Amino acid sequence: MRKGLPPAEQDAFVVLTQDQKLWRSYFDVSTDKDPYVVLMDAVGQVRWHGHGDAKFLEPLLGPALR
């Protein structure tokens, strides 16, 4: 997953490898085909979360990651 990210952006992503059942419930995962995204602020407050086709998420996330 990190291969597609420039090194300067890699610190902005967190990969979860534990508590899969809890996270799947939180995101209401219905398919493993969609990306599931959560945006958090500097203190860990969830500001937005959603899922769907990456082409629809990119316009939402582009400004947030810059």
Image: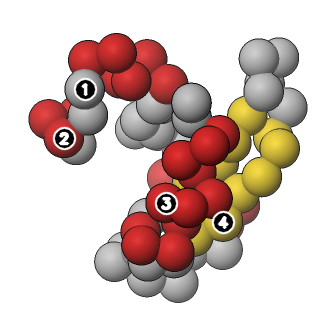
Residue bearing mark 1: 6
For marks 3 and 2, give the CA distance: 14 Å
**Amino acid on which the number 4 mark rests in the picture:** Gly
Whether residues under marks 1 and 4 lie with C-beta atoms below 8 angstroms apart, the answer is no
Contact between labelled residues 2 and 1, with CB atoms less than 8 Å apart? no
Q: Residue furthest left?
A: 3
Residue at mark 3 to residue at mark 4: CA–CA distance: 12 Å
Provide the secondary structure element on which disc 2 rests. Answer: helix
User: In whole angstroms, how far apart are the C-alphas of marks 2 and 4?
Assistant: 21 Å
Q: Which residue is mark 2?
A: 4
Q: Earlier in the sequence, mark 2 or mark 4?
A: 2
**What's the amino acid at mark 3?**
Glu
| Residue type of the residue flagged with mark 1 | Pro
62 to the left or right of 9: right
Q: Give residue 63's position: percent from left, percent from top.
A: 62, 43
Mark with earlier residue (1, 4): 1
Disc 1 residue crowd, few under 14, some 14–19, many 20+, Cα 10 Å: few
x and y percent of residue 26 in the render?
Answer: 71, 61
Residue of label 3:
58
Question: Which residue appears at 49% of the width and 60% of the height?
Answer: 58
Q: Earlier in the sequence, mark 3 or mark 1?
A: 1
Position of 29 with respect to 50 (left or right) is left
Q: Where on the picture, by quarter, is residue 24?
A: bottom right
